[in-house]
Image (tube, rainbow, N blue to C red):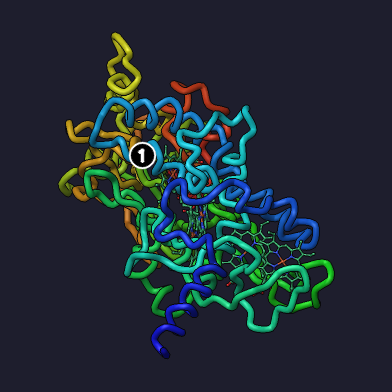
Amino acid sequence: MKKGLLTVGAIACMALVPYFVHAAEMGKLKYESFEQPGDCGACHTEIHEEWRQSLMSQSFTHQWDEVEYFKLALPHALKLEKVSGVKAGCIACHGPLAFLSGDIPPKPVKDGTRANEGVSCEICHGITGTSEAVPFNFSYNISPGNIKQGPRRDARPESHEVNFSEFTRSPELCATCHDEQSPYGAWVKATYREWKAGPYAREGTRCQDCHMYDAPGKAAEMGPERKDIAHHVFHGSHFESKLAGAVDLALYSTKTTLSAGGTLDLRAELFNGKAGHFVPSGSMEERMFWLEVYAVDAAGKRHHMPVQPKGFKGEEFTIADSRAVTYQDFGEIMGLKDYKGLSRDGNVPDGARIFRRPFFNPKGEMTVCQWYTAENTGVDYRIGPRETRTENYSWSLPKDAAKGFLTVEARLYYSQIPSSVGEFFKLEKSEYAPLLVNSNSLRFEVK
Ligand code: HEC
Ligand code: HEC
Ligand code: HEC
Ligand code: HEC
Ligand code: HEC
C-alpha cells in the first residue's frame, strides 16, 4: 500500500516537471517551451540590457560564429563521419534553443529563427545540474518552465517561482559549455579545468565573481534594492576594458648606457595577475597574445628586436615566422582547388614571441578547426593564472646608431583570430584586429 502511494507520488512529481531533459538531449523540447529574453526584460530591465550587450546574446548571430559553423563545421560534418556529431554539437552551446527543439541544422541568422536568441535567460536559469562529475560538452540538465533557478534564498517574485540553486552559483554551470572535448578526445576548451587547478579556485573566487561582478541595484523593477546584484555583462576578450592590463609587462636591463656597435640585453616579464585561468583561454585554437619589442634610436629609426629562443620542443610555433604556412584543412573541407593554406601567424611581425597553444588535425597540420583537433598537448606556451613568463632579448646596435636617447618600446597585443584567417573569410576587421593589452618602455643613452 505504502509502496503504491510512493509510486503515485513519483508519477505526480514527474508530471509537475514534464520538461526535464537529461544531459541536453536534442529535440526533446520545443521553442515554445522557452520564454523570450524580452519577456524577462519587462521586469528585469537592466539585466536584460546587460545581457543584450554581452556575447551570450550573440553566440549564434555573431559573424565568425555563423561563418565557422555554416562554411566549415557543418559541411565537414556532412562529409566526414568522425566529426558528424558537430552538426548538432556546436548548436547545443551556441544556439541551445534550436538544439533542444531539434531544429538541426538551424536556419541561417537572416531567417530570424529562435536559434538567434543564443544563450538566453531561460537556458542558464533553466539548467538544474549536470550529468557529468566534471562538466563539459553541453552536459547540462535543463528544465524550463515557471520555476527559475536562481542564486538567492529570499527572492519572492509574484509572476514566477524561483528555486535557490547552488548549481546556478557554481562555476560548474559555466563548465557545461566552457570546457569541450573534440571527437578525437582532445581537450579543446578547458577554461573551467584551468581555473579549477589554479589559485582562484583554492581561494573560492568563482567565474561569476570576475565575469558577473556584484554592484548595488535592483534585479527587477518591482524588486528590492540590493547591495550585490549580479551583473550580466560577461565581459571577456571581446571587450577592450576587460583585456586592458590583463597581463602586466615590465622590462629589465642591467645597463643604462650603450655604445654604437655594442649589445643591448633586455628581459621582459609578463604576469597574468587578473585572469582566473590561462591567457589566452576559451577558443585557444585561434587566440594569440604576442609581444613586439622595438628599439627606437635618437634619429627616430625603429628596429624590431626578435626574441631569444629558449630551445624547448615545439618552440617554432611560438615565434612569429612569415614563411610558415598552415590551415590547409580549409581546402579539404571547402573543396577548394589550388589552395595551399594561409600564413600561420598573419600580421604578427617576424621574431615576436607568441603566447598560444597550437592545435593539430589528424594529418599533423596546425588548425583552427577545434572539432578536427587530434593533438594539442605538445606545446602550451600560454600564461597561467598568476604565472610569470620571462622573455630575453639581445640586440646588436648598428655601428652607425644615432647618439643620444634610445627607447625600447614593448607592446603586448591580442587577437581573436589570425589576421590571415580573418581576411580569408572576409570577416569584419574588428573580429581579428590586434588589440593593445599592455605596453611599457625603457630609455637608454647611446654614447
Ligand atoms: C512580472 C515581472 C517579472 C518577469 C516578467 C520575470 N521576472 Fe524574474 N523576478 C521578478 C522579481 C520581482 C524577482 C525578485 C527580485 C529580487 O528579489 O531581488 C525575480 C527574480 C528572478 C530571478 C532571481 C531568483 C533569485 O534566486 O534571486 C531569476 C533567475 C529570474 N527572476 C528569472 C527570470 C526569467 C528568466 C524571466 C523570463 C523568462 C523572468 N524572471 C521574468 C519579476 C519578474
Ligand atoms: C550564462 C548564464 C546566464 C544567462 C544567459 C543569464 N543569467 Fe541570470 N544569472 C546567472 C548566474 C550564474 C547568476 C548568479 C550570479 C552569482 O551567483 O553571482 C544569475 C543571476 C540572475 C538574477 C539574480 C540577480 C541578483 O543578484 O539578485 C536574475 C534576476 C537573473 N539572473 C535574470 C536573468 C535574465 C532576465 C537573463 C536574460 C536577460 C539572464 N539572467 C541571463 C546566469 C545567467
Ligand atoms: C549554454 C552554454 C553556456 C553557458 C552555460 C555559459 N556560457 Fe559563456 N559562452 C557561451 C558561448 C557559446 C560563448 C561564445 C560567444 C561567442 O563568442 O559567440 C560564451 C562566451 C563567454 C565569455 C566570453 C565573452 C567575450 O567577450 O569574449 C565569457 C566571459 C563567458 N562566456 C562567461 C561565462 C560564465 C561566467 C558562465 C557561467 C556563469 C558561462 N559563461 C556559462 C556559452 C555558455
Ligand atoms: C580572477 C578573475 C577571473 C576568474 C576567476 C575567471 N576569469 Fe575569465 N577572464 C578574466 C579576465 C581578466 C579575462 C580577460 C583576459 C583574456 O581574455 O584572456 C578573462 C577572459 C575570459 C574568457 C575569454 C578568453 C579568451 O581568451 O578568449 C572566457 C571565455 C572566460 N574568461 C571564462 C571564464 C570562466 C568560464 C571562468 C570560470 C571557470 C572564468 N573565466 C574565471 C578574469 C577571470
Ligand atoms: C561545449 C560547448 C561548445 C561547443 C560544443 C562549441 N562551442 Fe564554440 N564556443 C563555446 C564557448 C564557451 C566559446 C567562447 C570561448 C572564448 O571566448 O574564447 C566559443 C567560441 C566559439 C567561437 C569564437 C567566437 C569569437 O568571437 O571569436 C567560434 C567561431 C565558435 N565557438 C564556433 C563553434 C563551432 C563551429 C562549433 C562546432 C564545431 C563550436 N563552436 C562548438 C562553446 C562551445
Residue 387, given in percent of the width and then of the height, sits at 36, 64
Dot 1 crowding, Cα within 10 Å, few <14, some 14–19, many 20+: many
Residue 169, given in percent of the width and then of the height, sits at 53, 73
| Image-based side of 362 in relation to 18, left or right | left
Residue extending farthest to the right is 222
Residue name at image x 83 percent, y 67 percent: 221
Name the residue tied to disc 1.
86
Residue name at image x 43 percent, y 47 percent: 26
Q: Is residue 220 above or below residue 246?
A: below
On whether ligand 5 comes within 8 Å of the CB at mark 1, the answer is yes
Q: Which quarter of the figure has residue 430?
A: top right
Residue 317, given in percent of the width and then of the height, sits at 26, 39
State whether residue 413 appears in this view: no
> Type of residue at label 1?
Val
State whether residue 23 appears in this view: yes
Q: Quarter of the image containing the C terminus?
A: top left
Residue extending farthest to the bottom is 2
